[in-house]
Amino acid sequence: MAGNSFLVVDADDFLRDALATLLRVVGLQVTAARTAEEAVTLARRDPPTAVILDDWLPDVRDQKVARGVLAQLKSHPDTRDVPIIVMTENASKTRRDRHWRPYNPDDVLIMPCQASDVREMLDKYGFEGRAVVPRMLPEKTA
């Protein structure tokens, strides 16, 4: 994939498509995968600039699958430097740290996320898209 490309990995069609659409709207290239096997195949065939990986995939309903994808991509010479952002619904910092930090993802995105969370992630990794991420997802209200 050419620069500023994402591989979005999520078994949920709606969530995968919504995130892919949001990224495309800001000018990024997106490839989508539904399973761990498909994610590894696509990433090795054409390494993306970054991967957004859901922590529950249909191959086996267990975080071990997503951890396996993370390990495979981080150990392969073509994908070891690709940032991997894990999406999880485990919102507490303690759970997030216990479940994911030992596997060294580059970042953890807490779901459900807001458009502002995606904007922050894009800024953090220096992705050059359009200046404004549209409010496709409702913002948090106080």
Image: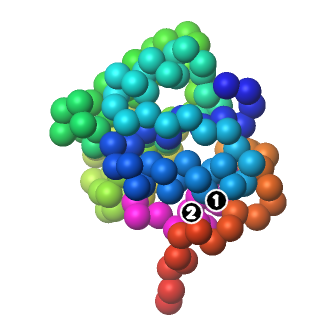
Residue type marked 2? Asp
Could you say where residue 7 lies in the image, as x and y percent from the top left? 54, 35
The quadrant in which the N terminus is found is: top right
Crowding around mark 2 (Cα neighbors within 10 Å: few <14, some 14 to 19, many 20+) is some
Picture coordinates of residue 141 (x, y %)? Answer: 50, 86
Cα–Cα span, label 2 and label 1: 5 Å
Kindly identify the residue that appears in the image at 40 percent across and 55 percent down: 14
Q: Amino acid at mark 1?
A: Glu
Q: Is residue 26 left or right of residue 35?
A: right
Q: Give the residue number, with chain letter if any, for mark 2.
A: 117
Does 98 appear above or below 91?
A: above
What residue is pinned by disc 1? 120
Q: Quadrant of residue 95?
A: bottom left
Q: Do tag 2 and tag 1 residues touch (Cβ < 8 Å)?
A: yes
| Residue 52 drawn above or below residue 91 | above
Specify the segment rendered in magenta. Answer: 111-122
87 vs 60, nearest the viewer: 60
